[in-house]
Image (cartoon, coloured by chain):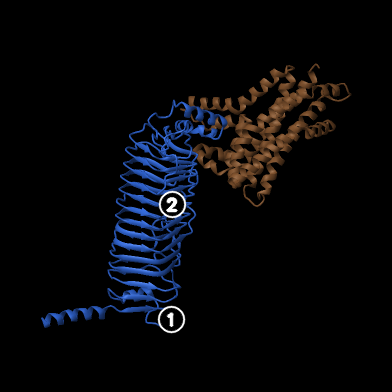
Chain colours: A brown, B blue
Amino acid sequence: MFKILKYCFFDLMRSSWSYVYFGFYLLLGIMLLFLNNDLSKAVITLMNIIIVLVPLIGTIFGVMYYYNSKEFTELLLAQPLKRSSIFLGQYLGVAFSLSMSLILGLGIPFIVYGLFKSNAIWDFSLLLIVGVFLTFIFSALAFNIALSHENKIKGFGYAILLWLFLAIIYDGLFLMSLILFEDYPLDKVSLIGTMLNPIDLSRTLIILKLDISALLGYTGAVFKQFFGTSFGLIISFSALLIWVGLPVMRIIVKSKKKDF
Amino acid sequence: MKRTFLIVLLIITTCFASATTITICEAGCDFQSIQTAVDSSKSGDSLFIKAGVYKEANIIIYKKSLHITGEDGTIIDTQNKGYGFSVEATDIIIKNLTLRNIKISYTKEYAGILLFKSYDFVIQNVTVENAFFGFLIQKSKDGEIRNNVISGQGTAEADSGNAIHLWHCENVRIINNDVRRMRDGIYLEFGNSSYIADNYSTENMRYGLHFMFSNDNIYENNIFEANGAGVAVMFSKRIKMFNNLFKRNWGTASYGILLKEINDAELKHNVFEDNTIGINADGTNRISYFENVFKNNGYAIKVHGACYDNIYTRNNFLHNSFDLSYSGKLNSNKFENNYWSNYTGYDLDKDGIGDVPYRPVKLFSYLVNRTPESIVLLRSLFIDIINFSEKVSPVFTPENLIDNKPLMHQASW
């Protein structure tokens, strides 16, 4: 598995897409810091972008990579290799290379602008951790979709739909249900609702760490009470881990049964 | 004629003769104790307290006009035994002193200086350290409190007092004081026609400045920074608030200024910066908001119910998360000629006024008002999308809540 991982990783490292992705974050980081010079403000803006873009790129890249390397995969399948290690290796290769682009692309400008001397370092590290989690979650989901659909167009369609659902539609439904049941106490419900969607969960985790959390008022206090404790933090990170774990399990199961 | 002249001369000379200066020092003068000096003085005398530490508490001045002055290093340490000075007299001056370690009590309001029914008083250059209450001024009139520094060590609202507390007072000038780490910085309870200027109030647990049932006051050029809840103006009429800076009052229950049951007030040239809520208005009528700056606040203005006939003109709203949050109907409040940094309209005739009206209430702030829990979706992409679509074609936000003549450039004055 590690050999395949290494193979995919270096294959991706050589591909221009990784450089584009890396360059994009590098440019973004530099621009943000150039424009407002304030590390903690830049973290907020960055959060808005990471929450939306990382899942999108993870999904599209995952699906694209799977379909592109289909012939190579089939070649590998002919070898005496375990199926799970082939697909897991590919998945991890994609996820690692995307995460690396993200970490390096954002990390370099921030370090140059004096991250280590600033107290935004914890917010920033949380941002990166969340970004890495989102990359792993969404590329796993993308692999799932690609494994289930031979048809490329269908696969891409479902992948984008998935992103659209988790990034936008989910929040819409969430908001609707909150308004629909506004006569009932909703803080627990909203807490659960946030936990169920990795994008919402990541956003909440970061917002609560920033000054802006004071805007959340009473609901924010409930959230802070939950996420502020180590118990809440453990729960939310386990939720993220489950979001990685379940799709990965499905990759293994699906790849074993799949007829190539 | 000659006789009257002589009588007048006699009166004048006796007057001057009677006003003596009594010196108090740690050793070597007539008096070592302030209280004994006060007891043996006559009305109109001056007391001069030389530098040194005086371990005295509850110094009582009763119906004697005294001018008490200290010098650099005159320290009265009450050793947590009670009041510093407890005064009931007219024409009283207390100057250049340091008071220390005022007793904390849950039943009595121990203060550095307590004035009761005192008229024409001056408290100047007094430092109160480790204060419970700083100056507690009751039923007094025509005084001046200037250049004092008051700081406390309280940890909770219950075991700390107010720096300058006026109760049933009139015509008091509170100028250039520095108050910090108390419960309220300056508190006027039934305090009328007073003037509060150039004070710096910071790190107080509750309010930097607090008005209750106090009418016809003016406060200007003050700085209120990082107080627990900000500044509260409640149940008062005709308050003028000019040129104040409300800054960094940040927390889940904080605001720059809370206006509750306020009528006929005037806010002009104030700056609200980095507050969770710039102005929290509840039951306010006929208030003019003119040329204020709202910058980087969570909410610039949050209007609750029962606000009638308020006018907002020429204010600058710069980069607030929400410019305005509004409950209920418009109730004849008027927004005109404000500058909104979120305004995206155009100005074809170049008269400096945008051709497209601006709606300061975003759909999201309307939703949050309705269902407070929906605030968890703050900064979600979905929210940006619905805000945008609402901006393009308003459906939910109040139709007449609108600035018809938004400025294209920041108002300057």
Between residues B143 and B273, which one lies in front from this camera angle?
B273
Residue B389 in view:
yes
Relative to A79, residue B34 above or below: below
Chain letter belonging to callout 1: B
Q: Give residue B245's mark.
A: 2
Residue A38: where, in percent of width, then height?
59, 47
Q: Give residue B27's mark.
A: 1
Q: Nearer the viewer, mark 1 or mark 2?
A: 2
In this rendering, would B157 be left or right of B37?
right
Give the residue displayed 79% in from the left and 24% down from the top.
Answer: A69
Between residues A102 and B149, which one lies in front from this camera angle?
A102
Residue sticking out furthest to the left? B1
Q: For mark 1, does the 10 Å Cα neighbourhood hold few (<14), some (14 to 19), or many (20 or more) residues?
A: few
Q: Secondary structure at mark 2?
A: strand
In this rendering, would A197 be left or right of A90?
left
Between residues B391 and B55, which one lies in front from this camera angle?
B391
Give the residue displayed 39% in from the left and 32% down from the top.
Answer: B401
Which residue type does callout 1 highlight? Ala
